[in-house]
Amino acid sequence: MSEDCIFCKIANGIIPTEFVHTSANTVVFKDINPKAPIHLLVVPKKHIPTLNDLEDRELMSELLQSVKDVTKKLNISDYKTQINTGKGAGQEVFHLHIHILANKEG
């Protein structure tokens, strides 16, 4: 855990947040500045700054499985996923995360 990382604090319960979904190594919660009616973040519990830093293939799989699990749970069939990697690509929080954006549930 990185002590100054907001997503580490959220994922580890230091900053209270309602999780929409959890798995062994990921958490999913609502974005506080949504860019769509539904805007969720899938975040690994372990601090990994960017996609370029992710070497664990099992965690890669679990992150995508969490996307599938939470969208199924919320009955969301049409959605966009986005990973911003690096400052030049718009990454603002340097803790790997996948955005899930959708217009509506069901």
Image (tube, grey):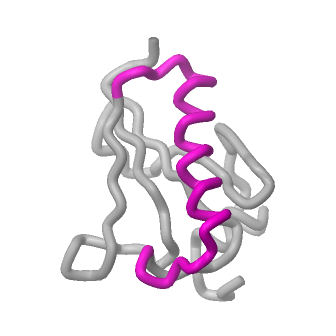
Report which quarter residue 16 is drawn in: bottom right
Task: Give the side of residue 102 with respect to residue 62, left or right.
Answer: left
96, above or below 27, in the image = below
Residue at the far top in the pictured view: 106
Instruction: Specify the segment rendered in magenta.
Output: 51-78
Q: Is residue 106 left or right of residue 7?
A: left
x, y percent for residue 63: 58, 55
How many numbered marks are there?
Answer: 0
Q: Is residue 63 above or below residue 71?
A: below
- The quarter of the picture where the N terminus appears is bottom right
> Which residue is rendered at x = 77% and y = 67% of the image?
12
Q: Is residue 39 magenta?
A: no
Q: Residue at x 44, y 78 (%)?
A: 50
The part of the image, by quadrant, that contains residue 69 is top right
Q: Nearer the viewer, residue 96 or 103?
A: 96
In terms of depth relative to the viewer, which is nearer, 11 or 44?
A: 44
Q: Main secondary structure of the magenta part?
A: helix
Please report the residue visible at 53 percent of the width from the left and 77 percent of the height from the top.
54
Q: Residue at x 69, y 74 (%)?
A: 46
On screen, residue 79 above or below 106: below
| Residue 59 located left or right of residue 54 | right
* x then y, percent, for residue 2: 66, 87
Q: Specify the farthest residue to the left.
A: 88
Residue 41 image position (x, y, % from top left): 50, 51
Quadrant location, the C terminus = top left
Question: In the rendered structure, does residue 57 fall within the stretch colored magenta?
Answer: yes
Q: Relative to residue 19, is residue 76 drawn left or right?
A: left
Residue that extends furthest to the bottom in the rendered view of this protein = 3
